[in-house]
């Protein structure tokens, strides 16, 4: 499968949405958004697609920041 199945603009939009949630302190929401995006990229573009790995890295970062700083439960 190719990234044509999930346009780069859609990936960028969703990454920005998750990053904004993280910036707002909504770490649980950010982690969920990154996780969903990573899984969607894997399903459409392949298991080891670089953008999927980026999304899962964002998820891990959000979880870490939430655990360290308390974060919002949303």
Image: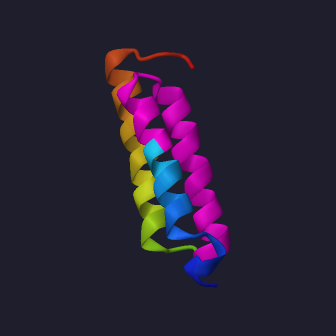
Quadrant of the drawing holding the N terminus: bottom right
| Residue 46 seen by the camera | no
Q: Is residue 23 left or right of residue 42?
A: left
Please give the range of residues in magenta.
Answer: 17-45
Query: Does residue 37 belong to the magenta stretch?
Result: yes
Q: Nearer the viewer, residue 71 or 16?
A: 16
Q: Is residue 68 visible?
A: yes
Is residue 32 magenta-colored?
yes
x and y percent of residue 52 in the render? 50, 64
**Image point 58% across, 39% down: which residue?**
32
Outermost residue, bottom direction?
A: 1
Q: Position of residue 53 (x, y in %)?
A: 44, 63
Residue 42: where, in percent of width, then height? 60, 68
Above or below, 20 relative to 68: below
Quarter assignment of residue 19 = top left
Above/below status of 60 relative to 66: below
């Amino acid at each position: 499968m190719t990234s044509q199945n999930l346009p780069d603009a859609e990936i960028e939009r969703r990454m920005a949405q998750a990053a904004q949630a993280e910036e707002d302190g909504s770490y649980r929401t950010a982690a969920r958004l990154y996780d969903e995006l990573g899984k969607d990229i894997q399903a459409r573009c392949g298991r080891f697609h670089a953008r999927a790995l980026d999304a899962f890295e964002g998820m891990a970062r959000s979880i870490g920041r939430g655990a360290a700083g308390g974060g919002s439960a949303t």
